[in-house]
Image: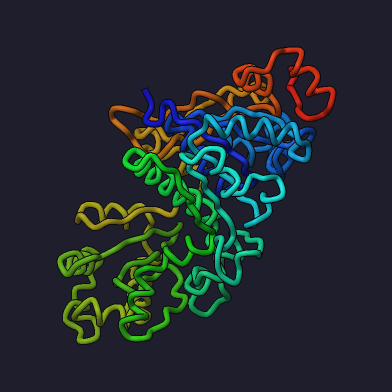
């Protein structure tokens, strides 16, 4: 049994954010139908730079537990098919520019007239309202405009984006949360609703602590490298063979930290007496710590810190992450069998549910792989499906 057994989702998405949202629902058991254009499919199907046996890793990473229905939405008969799906679906997810789907009669007002109980979710660059609503959006731009890049990077260096597409992934997560909340609300009201989130708002939302600090005294955070505006020492330090991170979240840990690195004299120095003072003077503090640990090995530092009960860790590259014993113990790396790519390793859903665990039931579909199956279930006869294919309304994967 899965958490979302019986929930039907229409996935009219491309790229990352909304596709990730739909994949979350699929991992939790929903029946997700991904609608794609004939011929090319969604953009990520041909997106490089990495491929496995001709299959894009970008597409493979965002589209498991989905069935592929290939429709040409420029054709009236294709829109009719989508309308039939809407009648029996619970969730509709899209990430087009606000208003763009109106010409296909697939905007929220049109869709809710077909199925008032439908949860309609839009993930866009800036949301459906406001002066930026008509603009397109990408993760890089959202990171810059939301303030994320202003606090990321070295103190004396240029603004830097986070290495992963965090506003894309984050908005997909927020969208999934909104959909799940709307499904629970529907149990009480028997009404659907519009779920509207964006990359920009995700980036802004993640600044909640800094924004509260700003409201308190007008302070604007600056780039601090790996250091923290809340705690010190709480950052990365270089060793003779690498680097490690460490956080001393209270006075007890701070005193232990000084003791294990023979820095106990710092405890009584006026500029480091409290965490507030250490944050204020952390540039001089970090230099003193760095001068001590630079002659030690990373593992030596981690051993000392762990023995003292101080949170710490190495700075891993991806190959080290994959082989990390904690990753292995938590079964975060799993395999899926793809018809063309073969056995593909991927990441598991990162939440453990004791009664209704997430799982991979379907590898990412080939373009149009489930078109006939879905249409049959809608009541279309085989000869009707053949006719629709000849009229180029649909595409059916024939298998090779």
Observer-nearest of 251 and 115: 115
- Would residue 139 appear left or right of 40 to someone viewing this image? left
Residue 380 percent location from the top left of the image: 67, 18
Observer-nearest of 98 and 11: 98
Quarter of the image where the N terminus is located: top left
**Does residue 51 appear in the picture of this structure?**
yes
152 lies above or below 44: below
Observer-nearest of 75 and 260: 75
156 lies above or below 327: below
- Would residue 236 appear left or right of 381 to someone viewing this image? left
Residue 396 percent location from the top left of the image: 74, 22
Quarter where residue 32 is shown = top right
- Would residue 264 appear left or right of 97 to someone viewing this image? left
Residue 261 percent location from the top left of the image: 25, 66
Q: Which residue lies furthest to the front in this view?
A: 113
Residue at left offset 70%, top offset 26%: 368
Residue 17 percent location from the top left of the image: 56, 49
Residue at left offset 35%, top offset 82%: 284
- Would residue 165 appear left or right of 42 to someone viewing this image? left
Q: How many marks?
A: 0
């Amino acid at each position: 049994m899965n958490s979302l057994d019986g929930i039907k989702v229409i996935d009219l998405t491309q790229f990352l954010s909304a596709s990730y949202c739909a994949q979350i629902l699929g991992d939790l058991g929903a029946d997700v139908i991904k609608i794609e254009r004939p011929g090319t499919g969604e953009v990520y199907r041909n997106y490089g730079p990495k491929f496995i046996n001709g299959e894009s890793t970008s597409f493979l990473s965002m589209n498991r537990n989905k069935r592929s229905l290939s429709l040409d939405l420029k054709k009236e008969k294709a829109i009719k098919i989508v309308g039939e799906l809407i009648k029996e679906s619970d969730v509709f997810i899209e990430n087009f520019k606000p208003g763009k789907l109106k010409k296909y009669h697939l905007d929220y007002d049109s869709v809710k007239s077909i199925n008032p109980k439908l949860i309609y979710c839009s993930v866009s660059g800036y949301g459906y309202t406001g002066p930026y609503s008509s603009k397109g959006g990408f993760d890089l731009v959202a990171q810059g405009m939301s303030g994320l890049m202003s606090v990321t990077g070295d103190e004396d260096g240029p603004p830097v984006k986070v290495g992963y597409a965090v506003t894309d992934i984050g908005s997909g997560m927020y969208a999934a949360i909104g959909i799940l909340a709307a499904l629970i609300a529907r149990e009480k009201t028997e009404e659907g609703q519009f779920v509207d989130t964006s990359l920009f708002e995700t980036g802004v939302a993640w600044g909640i602590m800094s924004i509260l600090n700003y409201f308190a005294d007008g302070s604007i955070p600056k780039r601090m490298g790996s250091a923290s505006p809340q705690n010190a020492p709480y950052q990365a330090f270089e060793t003779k063979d690498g680097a490690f991170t460490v956080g001393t979240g209270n006075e007890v840990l701070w005193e232990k930290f000084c003791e294990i690195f023979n820095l106990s004299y710092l405890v009584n120095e006026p500029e480091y007496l409290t965490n507030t003072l250490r944050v204020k003077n952390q540039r001089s503090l970090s230099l003193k710590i760095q001068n001590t640990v630079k002659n030690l090995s990373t593992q030596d530092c981690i051993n000392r810190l762990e023995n003292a009960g101080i949170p710490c860790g190495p700075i891993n590259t991806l190959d080290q992450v994959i082989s990390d014993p904690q990753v292995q113990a938590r079964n975060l790396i799993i395999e899926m069998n793809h018809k063309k790519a073969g056995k593909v390793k991927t990441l598991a859903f990162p939440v453990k549910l004791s009664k209704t665990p997430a799982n991979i039931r379907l590898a990412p579909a080939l373009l149009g792989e489930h078109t006939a199956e879905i249409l049959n279930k809608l009541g279309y006869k085989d000869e009707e499906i053949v006719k629709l294919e000849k009229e180029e309304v649909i595409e059916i994967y024939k298998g090779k």
